[in-house]
Amino acid sequence: MLKALCRVAKAPLRAEASDRSEMVSELLFGEEVKLLERKDNWARVMCDWDGYEGWVDFIQLIEKLSSNRETTKVQLPILDCLLDGEIIRLPLGSKLQKLDGKYLFEQLTIELNEYIPITFENPAEKLIHTAKLFLNTPYLWGGRSCFGIDCSGLVQVCHSLINIPLKRDASEQYLQGEKVERVEDVLPGDLAFFKNKKGKISHVGILCSNNQIIHASSWVRIDRFDEKGIYNEERKTYSHELAGVRRNIV
């Protein structure tokens, strides 16, 4: 099966082969997909990191040539660099290839401006730090970047920087990791999930502590958290009802 990489800063992944179709997710620069089907100028692809499928404009992809290069991920909200001499702004989570100390994109050279990835000893600390880089990012259904992001996209991208692969949707993420039985036992970095009126998982956020959560709701924000759910101080009411807590960081 042929493989390809996203060649633009971010590419919409759509439900159907049309620019008018709903955006269900996004591909970030350097992320890898399998090519499943071609239809005119569109390709149906499967994302390597989560198995998610959708349609992308084929011109926004480049056939993958290399296979064994070291990779690293952008850890800044936006990284300005040159791709074969032309400026490109890469969002957090974009994948860069390395070979002999140089950053590459297949046959092209990426020139970075003194980029030094941030390191953390504690993965939970890195997870929360990364999530806070998205603060005030507007909510965007299907979004996975600081230009717009949804709740499960925020959780997925942040976990990718600590090498924990999560599924794309909150309902799928709820099935991963270990269940935390009691709210009083939660730890920073745990994921809290919330249900709608029908009892289905509809929202997710990252716990900063036992009483604060960072999540994407209208925008990426930090709100109060307790055994009932998320409390919105501005509206003086609970905005989300707690369904459960899961732990992926051991």
Image: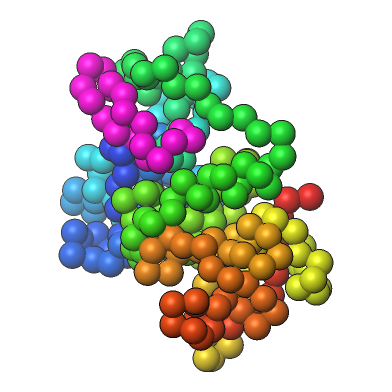
Q: Residue furthest top?
A: 100
Give percent across and percent down for residue 171.
Answer: 57, 71
Which picture quadrant has residue 59?
top left
Note whether 197 is above or below 193 in the view shown: below
Picture residue at 59% right of the left edge, 49% below the top: 128
Residue 50 appears left or right of 13: right
- Above or below 207: residue 132: above
Is any part of residue 3 visible from this angle?
no
User: Magenta stretch: dominant SS?
Assistant: strand
**Quadrant that contains the N terminus:** top left
What residue is shown at x 70% (from left), y 56% (from top)? 188
In this picture, is 84 found above or below 189?
above
Q: Which residues are magenta?
A: 74-91
Instruction: Indicate left or right for 35 with 100 as reference.
Output: left
Can the viewer see residue 229 in this picture?
Answer: yes
Q: Hey, which quadrant is residue 113 in on the image? A: top left
Please check the rendered image and state whether residue 235 is part of the magenta-colored stretch, yes or no: no
Would you say 112 lies left or right of 101 here?
A: left
Report whether 189 appears left or right of 144: right
Residue at the (31%, 39%) spot, across then down = 9
In this picture the colour scheme is: rainbow
Q: Residue at x 44, y 12 (%)?
A: 102
Compared to residue 226, the image places residue 135 above or below, namely above
- Given residues 219 and 97, the one toward you in this image is 219
242 or 106: nearer the viewer: 242
Numbered-mark total? 0
Residue 94 at what x, y percent from top left?
Answer: 42, 37
Residue 40 position, x and y percent, is 18, 51
Depth check: 48 or 35 in front? Answer: 48
